[in-house]
Image: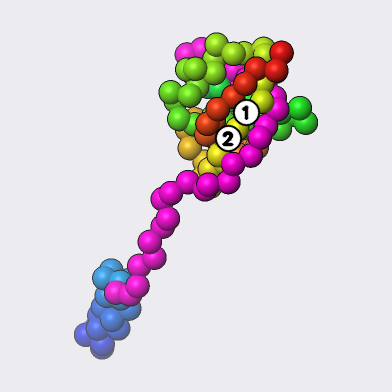
């Protein structure tokens, strides 16, 4: 009786331990959707854990990725800016954990005022 129970247990465990089947590949490339956002650069968080976001005219907050872009945008805080950005499919960076507008990668920007 113990052997039958052990055999059934073993049969149930093997397919889960060694799955064989088709694996789906995730597309790791970012979306190529470019949009324009008119808004301001805002610094979120408390020192030493701060991150940069973009707040558009409607109040939507976008996380900025990659970190190198954040460093450039910190200097532009307070200006009204027109951004051309790529909207990323997946959240990236610390800001994406807190800002609900999504994650964007700024391509170019021009200061309006």
Dot 2 crowding, Cα within 10 Å, few <14, some 14–19, many 20+? many
Between 100 and 71, the one lying in front of the other is: 71
Q: Quadrant of residue 8?
A: bottom left
* Magenta region: 20-49
Q: Secondary structure at mark 2?
A: strand
Query: Could you tell me how many numbered marks the image carries?
Result: 2
| x then y, percent, for residue 26 | 41, 57
| Residue occupying image coordinates x 21% and y 85% | 3
Q: Which mark is residue 85?
A: 2
Q: Secondary structure at mark 1?
A: strand
Between 9 and 30, the one lying in front of the other is: 30
Query: Which scheme is used to colour this image of the protein?
Result: rainbow
Q: Is residue 87 shown left or right of residue 81?
A: left
| Residue occupying image coordinates x 26% and y 70% | 18
Compared with 12, 1 (above or below) is below
Task: Give the residue at mark 1.
Answer: 83
Q: Is residue 5 visible?
A: no
| x then y, percent, for residue 25 | 38, 61
Q: Is residue 110 visible?
A: yes
Compared with 88, 55 (above or below) is above
Between 1 and 6, the one lying in front of the other is: 6
| Residue occupying image coordinates x 58% and y 46% | 33
- Residue 38, magenta (yes or no): yes
Dot 1 crowding, Cα within 10 Å, few <14, some 14–19, many 20+? many
| x then y, percent, for residue 37 | 67, 32
Between 72 and 61, the one lying in front of the other is: 72
| Residue occupying image coordinates x 65% and y 17% | 111
- Residue 89, magenta (yes or no): no
Compared with 13, 33 (above or below) is above
């Amino acid at each position: 009786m113990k052997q039958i129970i052990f055999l059934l247990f073993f049969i149930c465990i093997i397919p889960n331990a060694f799955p064989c089947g088709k694996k789906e590949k995730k597309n790791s490339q970012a979306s190529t959707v470019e949009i324009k956002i008119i808004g301001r650069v805002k610094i979120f968080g408390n020192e030493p854990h701060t991150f940069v976001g973009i707040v558009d005219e409607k109040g939507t907050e976008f996380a900025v990725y990659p970190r190198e872009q954040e460093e450039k945008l910190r200097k532009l805080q307070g200006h009204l800016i027109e951004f051309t950005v790529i909207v990323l499919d997946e959240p990236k960076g610390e800001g994406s954990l807190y800002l609900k507008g999504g994650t964007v990668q700024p391509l170019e920007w021009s200061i309006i005022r």
